[in-house]
Amino acid sequence: MVSMKLKFRPSAIEGKEGRLFYQIIYKRKIRQVVTPFQILSDEWNPKKEELVIKSPSARTDYLESIRRTVQCDKARFEKIVSLLLCSNTTITVDRLVAEFQKQSSSPTLFCYMEKMIVAYWRQGQYRTSETYSTTLNSFRRFRADMDVNLADVDSGMMVAYENYLKRNGLSPNTLSFYLKHLRAVYNRAVDEELIVDKKPFKRVFTSIEKTSKRAISLRLIKRLKALDCSCNPSRQFARDMFMFSFYTRGMSFVDIAYLQKRSLKGDRLFYRRKKTNQPLTIHWEPCMLEILKTYGAEQSSPYLFSIIKEPDENPRRQYQNALFLINRHLKEIGKELGLHQPLTMYCARHSWASIAHEEGIPVSVISEGMGHDSEKTTQIYLASLKTEVIDKANRKILRLL
């Protein structure tokens, strides 16, 4: 009788994560295979010997990724046992462990991505973890949940996946989003020398198509600032968060939500971008202080603003819920202002970049102020502005006729 069971070894320190491991048994001989996964004691059911996933919680996605990886590992182990039994070779518990670990070094795409997702989550890169999770879910649907060896990923498969996305009505940039993240996974496996590069992405779209304009003019920013929202506190909060983002050089809402009281030191605001972990500092201006006076968090809270109100109850979900409501109110405001494109928090970031460029501020300075890794990223923000400048120049020439 061959079996592989998931086991949990709790930490000797109370409240600290313990380690998950596999117990492989054959002919009463037992071996252990340690996994990279760590969980808390209350996330393990000792009677059923399985994960306990409380939904919703801050760790739900992380635990779900572990669960799927365990399922993948167990299926791979069963396949190993089946192949060895069919080969009429001598089977020992040590050989089972060796074959299992050998195949772990040349993993399937699903399992490899699940482990990446878990690793990013443990590193606190929640958005990156969610992005790869979204990509994997899309590719799972395309494959009808049939896994594939990383070594078998080829150009034909990626072209078929691209066509599948097109048939489902996805935009070119969404296609590129999924394919670029799959390419990053594949390249990482190549860098780790798990597979030989077959260049599977050479025939698919992984560029960025110019998007519709997201920036609004300085005139509209002034109208938005002067708008009387006093009769609707939720709408006023949305407007003020937009303005705070604009005041702080287009700070992303996730960074605003996670600002802590200790981030403000004297006349400087210090923070790290959630997206890139890049440290940034901003001079604290009176207009920023006015908004903080209205929406500052309670004294007991570590946060600067009253956005994440319960620090111990899934901060990320609170931030996401707040962003959803803010964007809903901003879109309503945008319609009242006569905007043709939806007004969202992200527009504040684009608007600051575009207005700064119109005022003659060099792209290099704008790039540094926004925390971009390169000026190439900043140029994407300014692409629609360039189009307007060219159109204006063309009209000027046409008037000469």
Image (spheres, rainbow, N blue to C red):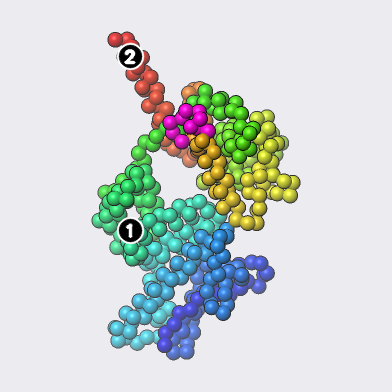
Q: Dot 2 lies on which element?
A: helix
In the rendered image, residue 178, in percent from the top left (x then y), is placed at 38, 51
Q: Earlier in the sequence, mark 2 or mark 1?
A: 1
Residue 284 visible in the picture? no
Seen from this angle, which residue lies furthest bottom?
A: 27
Q: Which residue is mark 1?
A: 142
Which one is in front, 135 or 216?
216
Q: Dot 1 lies on which element?
A: helix
Q: Main secondary structure of the magenta part?
A: loop
The image quadrant where one finds the N terminus is bottom left
Residue 199 lies in the magenta stretch? no
In the rendered image, residue 311, in percent from the top left (x then y), is placed at 65, 53
Q: Which residue is mark 2?
A: 397
Q: Residue at x 44, y 86 (%)?
A: 26
- The amino acid on which the numbered mark 2 sits, given as a three-letter code, is Ile
Which one is in front, 127 or 55?
55
Part of the protein shown in magenta: 333-342
Tell me if residue 112 comes above or below residue 325 in the rendering.
below
Marks 2 and 1 in Cβ contact (< 8 Å): no
Quadrant in which residue 148 is drawn: bottom left
